[in-house]
Image (cartoon, coloured by chain):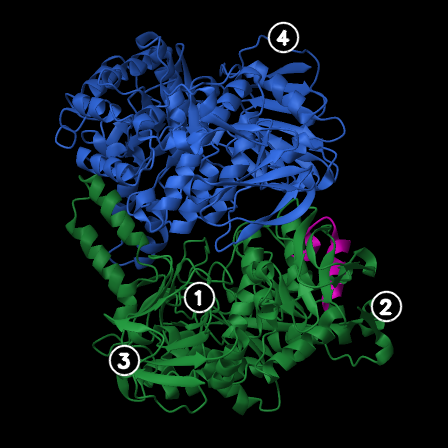
Chain colours: A green, B blue
C-alpha cells in the first residue's frame, strides 16, 4: 500500500512512473516538526536503502547526505558519494518504506545524533513523499520498484569482462592490452576509453593522431569479440568553432548564471559550459550528439563528471584574484598561507557555484541547488532517449557516475572512483543490495580499485567478487600502478578467475533478467531471506545472488580463508586453478573455510542447483570470439550442474 | 644469536644498548645488490614488526616507508605514520629478525612489487644492521628487546582512564569535564591539556587568563585523584623577549639552514625554530625547561609535533611569493589554479625543508634528512634525562607522537592522530603487538577517534578495547563532535566499561611490569602462542594479553556480536551492565558470540585464572579518589577470580 504526500511545489523528477493519487492527510509514521521528519526507532530497528551510499547494508548509526558529489576517497566519515537515492526501508515490527522525491540536498540522520532517532531533513521543502507499507522489506521493495518502473537491461555482451585505465590514450596502448589478454588466454569483452581519446577533452571528437581511422579501428577490435567503450563528460569545452559549444551557446542550451549568461566552470578541458540537461530541448540536442560515436561503430558509453564535478569556476577565480591583489602577501605570509591557500583549495565542487547556476526547466528558471541530484540522471536520459530513436533495434551499454532514482530505467552505474583498498572490496559488496533496492541492477565497482596502488593479491581477491557483478570492469587511475590482470606474476590464476565469470554467465544473466522482470533483488542481504535467524540478519559480508547462490568473498589481505555463516545446509564450491571445481557439503552454522588466493568461492543452497558452462567450452579456441562477444548459444551438453 | 654489520659511517642512534661486536663478514640471509637487501619469501613466510605502522599484524603484501610523518588520515595506502621502527621478524622455516639502525628514510617492500620478494631500500647507506637468529618469533623478539634495553615504566596512575580534547582551553572547561565525570560516577585519573593552555602556543608558558593560579589549580584537581597532563610541542615561537627563544638563539641551540642561520618554519605559534635535540647541550637545555611545569605540580606530559611537523617554511613561502609575483595570474587562471594552487598546498611537511635543515651532533654538522627519524625520540629523551635529575625519586608520565626504537626506554607513545572510524578500532588492536616487538609498552590510541565525528556506539565499542591498553585515553579534535563519555545517552554503560578498566588494573599493571622485566610481549598475536594452528596463525582481530587473557573486541557497527576463534578451550567472560559478570565455558573452535554494545568481552585460557577487583570496591565512594589516583592498596578480600 503506497501513500503519496505533497509538500510545497515539487519539481517533477520523473523518478516515479506509476500514477498514484496524492493523499490529503498529514503524513503518517513520522512526526513532522521544524521541517524535519522524525521516527523513533527501537533497539531492533534496521534501516536499509540509500543505494550508492557509504558504510553498511544496515545503514543505522550514521548520517548520510543525498547530494551527488565527486568524492573519490570513500573513507568512513563521508556522507555523500556520487549518487542520491532517497529510498529507505525501515524494518521493525511494522516495516515501511519511504521515498523522498526531492532532488535537492536531503540529510538522513539514521541514529547519528541520537542513537534511536531517525531524522530526515530536506534542504528545500518542495517534494513528494511516498510511504509504502508492506509485510517484509522485500514486499516493500517490490512495491517501490514497481512504482519507479523497470530497470535498464544492457546488451548481453556487457556482462563480459572489461578492462579500463585512465588512460589507454592511443590505439597502440589498446592493442597492447588486447594482445596481452590474448597471449595469456584471458577472455575480455570490452576495453574502455578514458578522456584521452578525445581531442582536447571535447565530447564527441576523436583525437585523430592517437586513434587514426577510428571507425576501422573499432571494427577491427570488434572482430575479436571486443567492444570499445568511450567516456562522455558532462562539461563542454569553450572553444570557438567547436560545434557542440557553438550550438549550445546559440540555442541557449547551457546552464546559466543569475543574469542569464552561460555559467563558466573548469573541468578537464579547461573552461567549459554545462549542458542544461533539465531542459528537454537541450537534452534532445545533446543526446543526438551520441550519433557521432554510434556511427563509428560504438555500442557502449560511460557518462562521467556529471554530478556535475567542478574543478573551479570563473567566478571563484575572479574573486580569489581580487583577494590576492588586495592582500599584502608580500609582507604578510599568514594571509597567503592561512587564508588564500585554503580558499584556493576549497573552490572545487563548491556549494556557492551550485547555488549560482540556473536551469531552464520547461520554460521555468530553477536554481541548480534545488535540482542538483537530477543532473547526471538527465544527462544519461538524454543519451538513452536518443538511442531509442537512433538505434531502436539495438541495445546500447551505458552507465553513469552520478544518478538519482529514475535513471535506473535508462542505464546502469558504476560505483564511482574508489581506491585500491581492501575495505573497498567489502564496500563494493555492501552497495550491491542497497542499489538493487533503488532499482539499479547493472552495477559494479572499479575492480582492483581506481585510486592508489594495487597489489596482486588485492586485485585477485577483488576479481573473485567481480565475477558475480553485472558490470565487471578492472579500472585504475592515472599515476597508479598498472593493474591489468597480465601485469602480475600468477597470470594463470587470473585467467582462471575470468574463466569462472564466463562459466557463470548464463546464471548471472538469467538472474539479472528475472530480477528486472519481477522487480526483485538480484543480491539479497541474508536478513531478507532468513529473517528469523538472528546471526544471519546481522551478516554484512555475504549475499544471496538469485535464488540458488550465496557469495562470500575474501576481503582481507594475507587471509587463508574466512568465517562464513550458513543459515541452512549448503554446498561449498571452490573454483580452483585450471578449471577444477571442488564441492563440499557443509552443515548450517558457523565455519572457517579455507580459500586460497587463486580460488573463487561460492555456496549453493540445499536442494538448489546451478547450471554452469563446462570449462572445455570456455577453453575451446574456436569459440573464443563468440564467448567474448557473448553471442554463443549454448547447447545442453555445454553445461554442467553444481548442487 | 645476533650479528652486527656496519655499512658506511653510521650515525650513533643509541637505539641499541647492548655492546655487540661488528661482524666482518658480508651480510647473510639477504642478497645485497644495488644498495638493496633482498630476501625471497615462500608462500608461507610471515613478516612481523615495524611497530607503529599501517595495515596488518602480518605486514606482508605492502610497502612501508620509515619516515616519521604527520599523517592524520591513516587510510590503507599510507606508507608512513608517526613512528619509524625498523625491526622485522621474518617467520618461515628458519626465522630471523633484522633491525636496520638507520635514522634516514628506509623503504620496506614486503611483497608489494613482487608478491614473494622482500626488499629493504635505505635512502642513505650509512647504518648498522643487526641480524638475529632464533627458534621462534618470540625468541628473536626477546633477544632484540634485550639488545635495545628495558622499556619505560610510567607511574601507576598513568594506567587510569584519561580524558582529552583539543581543547579544554580554560580551567572552566576542565572543571566541566571533571564535574560531569563525577556526576555520572565515572572514574577518571587524568585530564589532558592540548595546545591552548599555553600563551600563544609557547612551550613552557601558561595562559594566565585561561588558567589563573595554575599551580593551585593543578593541586585542586590533584586532590580529587586527577592529574592534569599538558602537551609540549617541538617548535619554539620566534618572539623577542620569550626566554626559550632568546636562549635558543643565543646558544645556537636551534636547527640551522645550510648557512648556519636558524631555520624558520611555521607551526601552531606561527614562525618558529626547532630545538636541535640531536645536540646534547641543546637537549640538556630543553629538558631542563620542563622544570617550569614540574614546579607547578605537573607529573605527566605528551610531546607533540615532533616528526617534526611543518605547516610551511619561510623559504617555501618566499619562493611561492616570487612565483606569484612573476606570474601573470591576472590574465592566466590556469597558472593560478593548476600550478600555484597545488604548490601552496604541497608545502606542508615538505621533503625540501627536511633536506634544508642541519643539526649539530657532537660538533659535527649533519643534514636533517639523514637523521629525520631521531627527532621525536631525542625530544623525549631530552625531557626524560632532565626528569632523572630534576625529580629522581618520581616517575613521570610521558608519551610522544614521533618515535624511533630507543625512545621506548624513555617514554611511551600514542598512536597519533587517528579518526573516528570503525576500522581504526582494529588498527589500534593490530598496532599493539607490533609495537611490543619494538620495545614500546606504554601505548594506546586516541579512543573514540581523534578526527571526524564519533557516534555513541563507536565510542562505546572502542572503550571496550581501550580498557585493555596501558594508555587509555579518549581524545578528539577541534571541530569534531564532543565524545566524552557523558555526552551520550547510555552513560550507565560507559560508567560500567570504565569500571571494568579499574577492576582489571591489577592484572594489566602486573602484566605490564612482567613484560618489561622479561622483555616479553604484553600483547601476543595468536600465531606466537599457537604456531601449529593454521587458523589461529592468521587471526588478526584477537590478541593474547599476558598469559591468561585473550581479547576479541567488537569493531563493526550494528554488530550483535562477532566471530571468535578459540585455539583451545576457554571461558568466555562478559562484563555486563551494573557490574555483573557472566562466564561461559566454550570449546576450542569457531564460534559466533553475542556481545551487546554495553558489554566488555574477554576470554580466559583453560586452567588459567584472572584476579579482578570486586565491583563493590570500585563503587565504594570512600575509595573513589584512591582508585582514580591508583594509590589504593588492595586486600585479598578486594579481589575475585575469574576462570
Cα separation, mark 1 vs mark 4, equals 61 Å
Residue B385, x across and y down, in percent: 37, 12
Residue matched to label 3: A366
Decide whether the magenta segment is chiefly helix, strand or loop: helix
- Write down the chain letter for disc 4: B
Q: Is residue A494 magenta?
A: yes
Tags 4 and 2 on a common chain? no
Cα separation, mark 3 vs mark 2, equals 59 Å
Is any part of residue B89 visible from this angle?
yes
Residue matched to label 1: A82
- Give whichever of discs 2 and 1 has the lower sequence position: 1
Residue matched to label 2: A616
Question: Are the residues at dot 4 and dot 2 in contact (C-beta closer than 8 Å)?
Answer: no
Tags 1 and 4 on a common chain? no
Element assignment for label 2:
helix
Q: As rendered, which of A515 and A338 lies closer to the eye?
A: A515
Q: Quadrant of residue B191?
A: top left
Q: Which mark is residue B21?
A: 4
Tags 3 and 2 on a common chain? yes
Q: Quadrant of the C terminus of chain A?
A: bottom right
Is any part of residue A11 visible from this angle?
no
Question: Are the residues at dot 3 and dot 1 in contact (C-beta closer than 8 Å)?
Answer: no
Amino acid at each position: 500500500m503506497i501513500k503519496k504526500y505533497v509538500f510545497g511545489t515539487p519539481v517533477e523528477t520523473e523518478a516515479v512512473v506509476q500514477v498514484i493519487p496524492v493523499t490529503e492527510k498529514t503524513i503518517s509514521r513520522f512526526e513532522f516538526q521544524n521541517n524535519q521528519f522524525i521516527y523513533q526507532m527501537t533497539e531492533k530497528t534496521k534501516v536499509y536503502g540509500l543505494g550508492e551510499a557509504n558504510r553498511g547494508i544496515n545503514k543505522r548509526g550514521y548520517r548520510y547526505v543525498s547530494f551527488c558529489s565527486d568524492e573519490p576517497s570513500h573513507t568512513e566519515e563521508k556522507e555523500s558519494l556520487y549518487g542520491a537515492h532517497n529510498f529507505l526501508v525501515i524494518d521493525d515490527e511494522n516495516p515501511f518504506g519511504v521515498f523522498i522525491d526531492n532532488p535537492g540536498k536531503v540529510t538522513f540522520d539514521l541514529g547519528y545524533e541520537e542513537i534511536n532517532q531517525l531524522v530526515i531533513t530536506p534542504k528545500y521543502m518542495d517534494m513528494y513523499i511516498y510511504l509504502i507499507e508492506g509485510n517484509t522489506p522485500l514486499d516493500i521493495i517490490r512495491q517501490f520498484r514497481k512504482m519507479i518502473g523497470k530497470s535498464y537491461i544492457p546488451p548481453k555482451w556487457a556482462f563480459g569482462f572489461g578492462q579500463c585505465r585512465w588512460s589507454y590514450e592511443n590505439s597502440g596502448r589498446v592493442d597492447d592490452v588486447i594482445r596481452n589478454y590474448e597471449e595469456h588466454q584471458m577472455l575480455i569483452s570490452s576495453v574502455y576509453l578514458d578522456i584521452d581519446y578525445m581531442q582536447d577533452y571535447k565530447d564527441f571528437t576523436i583525437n585523430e593522431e592517437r586513434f587514426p581511422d577510428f571507425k576501422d579501428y573499432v571494427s577491427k577490435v570488434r572482430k575479436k569479440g571486443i567492444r570499445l567503450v568511450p567516456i562522455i563528460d558532462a562539461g563542454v569545452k569553450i572553444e570557438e568553432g567547436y560545434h557542440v559549444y557553438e550550438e549550445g551557446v546559440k540555442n541557449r542550451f547551457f546552464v546559466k548564471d543569475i543574469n542569464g549568461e552561460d555559467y563558466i566552470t573548469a573541468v578537464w578541458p579547461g573552461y567549459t559550459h554545462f549542458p542544461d540537461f533539465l531542459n528537454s530541448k537541450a537534452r534532445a540536442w545533446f543526446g543526438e550528439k551520441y550519433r557521432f560515436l554510434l556511427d563509428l561503430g560504438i555500442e557502449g558509453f560511460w557518462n562521467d563528471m556529471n554530478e556535475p564535478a567542478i574543478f573551479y569556476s570563473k567566478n571563484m577565480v575572479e574573486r580569489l584574484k581580487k583577494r590576492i591583489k588586495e592582500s599584502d602577501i608580500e609582507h604578510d605570509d599568514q594571509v597567503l598561507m592561512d587564508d588564500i591557500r585554503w580558499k584556493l583549495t576549497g573552490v572545487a565542487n563548491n556549494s556557492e557555484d551550485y547555488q549560482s547556476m540556473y536551469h531552464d526547466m520547461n520554460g521555468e528558471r530553477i536554481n541548480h541547488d534545488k535540482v542538483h541530484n537530477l543532473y547526471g540522471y538527465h544527462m544519461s536520459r538524454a543519451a538513452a532517449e536518443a538511442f531509442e530513436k537512433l538505434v531502436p533495434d539495438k541495445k546500447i551499454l551505458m552507465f553513469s557516475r552520478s544518478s538519482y532514482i529514475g535513471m535506473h530505467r535508462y542505464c546502469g552505474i558504476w560505483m564511482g572512483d574508489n581506491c585500491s583498498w581492501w575495505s573497498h572490496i567489502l564496500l563494493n559488496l555492501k552497495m550491491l543490495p542497497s542499489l538493487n533496492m533503488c532499482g539499479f541492477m547493472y552495477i559494479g565497482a572499479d575492480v582492483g580499485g581506481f585510486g592508489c596502488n594495487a597489489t596482486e593479491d588485492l586485485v585477485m581477491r577483488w576479481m573473485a567478487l567481480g565475477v558475480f557483478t553485472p558490470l565487471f570492469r578492472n579500472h585504475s587511475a592515472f599515476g597508479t600502478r598498472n593493474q591489468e590482470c597480465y601485469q602480475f606474476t600468477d597470470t594463470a590464476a587470473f585467467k582462471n578467475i575470468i574463466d569462472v565469470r564466463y562459466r557463470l554467465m548464463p546464471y548471472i544473466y538469467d538472474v539479472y533478467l528475472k530480477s528486472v522482470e519481477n522487480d526483485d533483488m538480484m543480491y539479497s542481504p541474508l536478513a531478507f531471506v532468513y529473517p528469523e535467524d538472528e546471526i544471519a540478519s546481522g551478516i554484512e559480508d555475504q549475499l544471496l545472488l538469485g535464488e540458488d547462490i550465496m557469495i562470500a568473498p575474501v576481503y582481507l589481505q594475507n587471509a587463508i580463508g574466512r568465517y562464513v555463516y550458513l543459515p541452512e545446509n549448503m554446498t561449498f564450491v571452490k573454483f580452483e586453478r585450471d578449471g577444477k571445481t571442488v564441492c563440499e557439503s557443509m552443515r548450517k552454522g558457523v565455519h572457517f573455510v579455507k580459500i586460497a588466493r587463486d580460488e573463487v568461492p561460492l555456496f549453493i543452497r540445499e536442494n538448489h542447483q546451478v547450471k554452469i558452462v563446462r570449462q572445455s567450452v570456455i577453453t575451446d579456441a574456436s569459440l573464443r570470439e563468440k564467448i567474448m562477444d557473448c553471442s554463443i548459444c549454448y547447447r545442453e551438453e555445454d553445461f554442467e550442474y553444481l548442487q
